[in-house]
Image: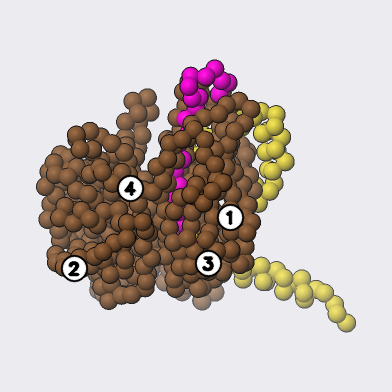
Amino acid sequence: MKKFLMFLTISLVSILFLPNKIYAKNIFPALPINEDFPYIISVYDLGEDIGTRKIYLTYCKDSSYHIRAKGNITEYGMCVDSNGNDQGLAYRRGLDYNGSDITKELIVNNRADFSSYSWGNEQHASWYGTILTYDNALSRLNYIKDYSFSGDYEIPSNLTTIIYTNNDIYNSSFDTIVFNKNLLNEDTNEMRCDTPSDYKYLGRVYGLNTFDFVVEKDIQFPINDEEINYDSNFDGVFQFTFSDKLDPLPTAQDFTITYTNDNNVPLIGNYDLTCENNACFVEYHYSTTSSELVHAKLTFYITYNGVNPLPSVDIRACPLVGINNYYTYSNSATGTGDILNDLNNNNINLGVLANVSSWLPTGPIDSILTLPIKMLQSLSDSLNRTCNPINVNLPYVNKNITLPCINTFYTNIGAGTFFNWVGVMVSALMLLEYFVFLYNWLNNVFRLNERNLKVWGTTGKGGYY
Amino acid sequence: MLNLLIMPILNMLSIIVKIIVYPINQLATNLLPDISSKIVEVSNYIESMFDSINWALGVLPVSILITLLFILSVEVTRHTIFVSTYLIGLVFDIIKKVKFW
């Protein structure tokens, strides 16, 4: 009886502590198959609790392309041109309800996945790739929520990035939002950064101490079928400027840059960043051993995480190409600018410490030795995040497959609730066993019958303290 | 919570490892640049695969993940208290043996 009451109490407590997101709820109609959308807004509404909502905006790289729903609603969409051919890449931006977690994804090979909770609206094509003022962004989100939209917004075409305030949406703080637009589309043999027109507009920042932006850079060499030894290294410089001189001047430690190659493989540590006056320079290094025509896309994720907020500044970038002794190459640079707005983030940011290890160059030995640590870091991160579908590139056939989350699968077959209830029951049993273990151990310790630290789930002693 | 407890420790470990092997790294990079770059490349591949742990954890229901997180946090806290107490006891023993007079 005593055990039963304990079990009952713990079960109730565990259920109360669990968030409501174990109840999946589909609040949006299905996407019509084979229809085009300028973008897809996916809302993953994981429960009755409003705080469990996630909103994703998926759109194609080129504003003339559309996302076409393929197959059925549980599959994926593709970026297609007016002839229906696969084109470009799709991007996805996500935001949590509390605005603190931004998902930034580049969806490779045209796959713009969406779940049965997705929904798109072709009626408002003007929304695509345009600046979102606070008002129309709010309306867009409210449109998702309420199925109603009214208002016609004049949107300056030369602006591209929204700045979001911390006004309430759904009666809570929603201080971060990221929407961006493809901006740079140059195709030239050699780019210089001599005149202001060489610098392309990325976005505008208002008093932020945290923001990031993404720049993509296509490199291709050799050009003109030149006989060049290109079994070599590639060096380049990427520069970005601010409209105002920054005071204090940012340092390299204020920025974190990671970049990936065309296989989306992270290249870590091979860059150098310096700042002077109102400009910062990123020197990067890319190695290749290919003896054929090389076309590589480097995607830079640049994050500023300074102690002091930046004033209102326009960020412009000019992708300089590097020339070394071996080759020259063509360069078509594309870029997207996006801003993570964090107006209220005036607290001490411990996240700076997370990147301290990147200050030292990566080498072969430490990259092997730190693999287990990185695995633990990934595990620790993953425990605090919700599942994201993964894109896997199959070697040799060069095909991308998307693996949807398992809970999506369970929901689609109608077993989501059952799955979650099984989870609740197992959790309750685990907690029961754990609390009984903890009670026995504490009882023995306080009665001085036990001096050792016993570890739950093992029979041995946890240490010799 | 768990992140706050564990991440600083992992970061410190990572830095310590990097500092210790820095000379060996430099030696290897200069003597065997090709192999070194390949090792880094392969490591990066494996590291990128770790990000899929997030997907793999999605196999478990959210409630179980939260429970595991809670139990893990309590266990880490328990260990920390025990180790701290043990070390304080050791220091106190040493202080007792020091004669100030």
Discs 2 and 3 carry the same chain letter: yes
Chain identifier of the brown chain:
A
Which residue corresponds to the image point at 30% horizontal and 53% vertical from the top-left? A129
SS category of the residue bearing label 2:
loop
Callout 2, which amino acid?
Gly
Q: Are marks 2 and 4 in contact (CB under 8 Å)?
A: no
In this view of the protein, which residue sits in the foreground, A253 or A3? A253
Q: Which one is earlier in the sequence, the residue at label 2 or at label 3?
A: 2
Q: Which one is earlier in the sequence, the residue at label 2 or at label 1?
A: 2
Could you give the CA–CA distance between mark 4 and mark 3, rounded to whole angstroms? 27 Å
Mark 3 — residue?
A310
Task: Give the chain letter at badge 3.
Answer: A
Callout 3, which amino acid?
Leu
* Snapshot quadrant of residue B48: top left
Which residue corresponds to the image point at 59% horizontal and 33% vertical from the top-left? A323
Residue B59 % position (x, y)? 30, 49
- Label 4: how many residues lie within 10 Å, few (<14), some (14-19) or many (20+)? many
Q: Residue furthest bottom?
A: B101
